[in-house]
Image: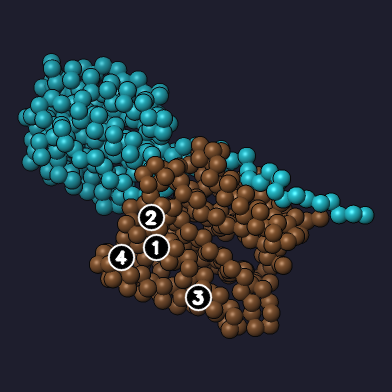
Chain colours: A cyan, B brown
Amino acid sequence: MIDEYISFEQVPFGSESFADNPEPRCPCVLLLDTSGSMAGKPIRELNDGIQAFKQELMGDHLATKRVEVAIVTFGPVSIETNFQTVANFTPRTLHTTGDTPLGAAVATGIDLVTQRKQEYKEHGIAYYKPWIILITDGAPTDSWRQAAQQISEGEDKKSFAFFAIGIEGANFEVLRELSVREPLKLRGLMFREFFLWLSASMKMVSSKNPGSNISLPPPTGWSEL
Amino acid sequence: MMWKTIGQSIAGTSHLQTGKACEDAVRYAIALQPDGGEVLVCCASDGAGSAKFAAEASLFLTGQIASLLCAEIRIGNELDEAALLEMFELVYDGFVEKANEVGEPLNEFSCTLLGCVVYAERAVFFQTGDGAIIRGDGSGGYVPVWWPQNGEYSNTTHFFIGDAAFSHVKMQCINEAVTEVGIFTDGLQMLALNYESLTVHQPFFTGMFKWLRKATTQDDTNILDKKLAAFLAGDLINSRTDDDKTLLLATRLMDE
């Protein structure tokens, strides 16, 4: 019997079958101050900013699949939306109410992140370091020392990255004690510019392959450095 | 011809867009023991995107490790974990020297390391950082030697120069005849591994190993090696990953 002759130049070499893994997720929690002092123009600008955030992320095909947003408002503390991918995230118009239980809001945000990571692990979903972003215009009306402790522990263990953004009138002394990173001051009511920066940062993070380091765009345009 | 090996490192589209060179590297060789026994030596590395000398680092690391391994095998030294550690120290010192020469911090030479030495009846594997090594399970399937070492987060990993004591380097000796191995860097991780079941995506490899097993001459293998490069540079892969990617496949099985 004659051996079958194989012309290796002709063989279809490679694979057309790839593993069907879920996209790695890039979780982001917004802790938004909706206390009485935010009434009027501030809350309108904040609402507009969140809409712009969604639209910007929707324009990036990787960010659309990978970024997950959760919103916690205070006060009182309420989980406005739990983690959702950008496509499913439909921000409702936020209204102002009540006082500023900032400490409880931070604790809620950290709980959400911890739960989400657990869900990722259970489903074999890879993920990026969660971001928790606090935006406030006032001073906490509840005990925030515990929250400061949780933030510092979380940052130490690299469990998340916490950013504090103060609007005019915010108590920056408290924010400084709360956040390991220097808090940033929003220039005027440039929420839109802030959220454009945040979406650009999220796009950068979510486009990175495992192993690559991230350098974020500088927070210029919206912060008073 | 006992071992048939092909291996390619191809620049990702994100690197091509930014004008960056391929920062992955791959090296392989057959080293002959004093008694004539063939030993397969394979090594791959992925230079960190953040490191200034990523491309140089991965080339240097794979070149050094492969030639040191071959030298030891040729003089008949059995490679075990202790021998590997000594070798790593030598190469680490080489990196320190390089960093001093250019006056840059050592982490500008960050890169991962994946490799294996396969004897007739024994194999040694080593890895630091992400990417993965797979091997034939003896019954037609493939298993990962380890699950990829990302940190908790997708964008964190370990690097060779990360620890002078190499506490983050995994090493494993297996006392059995390993007949097929595959090595790939993290650019292919999500395509070749199933994360929910923590298993190798079998069809990704079976089709390619099928042809490599059928190869009977070095010419056949060379053709497959060229086809591997075309596959890694092709649209099918590029639509799924924009990162650099390395794939090495080696078999000593023959298929009729």
Q: Position of residue B63 (x, y in %)?
A: 48, 68
Q: Is residue B219 left or right of residue B190?
A: right
Question: For mark 4, what is the residue?
Answer: B106
Crowding near the residue tagged with mark 4, few <14, some 14–19, many ≥20 C-alpha atoms within 10 Å: some
**Whole-Å distance between the Cαs marked 3 and 2?**
23 Å
Question: For mark 1, what is the residue?
Answer: B57
Q: Earlier in the sequence, mark 2 or mark 4?
A: 2
Q: Earlier in the sequence, mark 1 or mark 4?
A: 1
Q: Earlier in the sequence, mark 1 or mark 2?
A: 2
The disc labelled 1 sits on which kind of residue? Ala
Disc 3 with disc 2 on a shared chain: yes
**Chain to which the residue tagged by mark 1 belongs:** B
Disc 4 with disc 3 on a shared chain: yes
Q: Is residue B105 left or right of residue B47?
A: left
Quadrant including the C terminus of chain B:
bottom right
Question: For mark 3, what is the residue?
Answer: B68
**Whole-Å distance between the Cαs marked 4 and 3?**
22 Å
Q: Position of residue A157 (x, y in %)?
A: 30, 52
Q: Position of residue B162 (x, y in %)?
A: 35, 63
In this view, the residue in front, A197 or A95, is A197
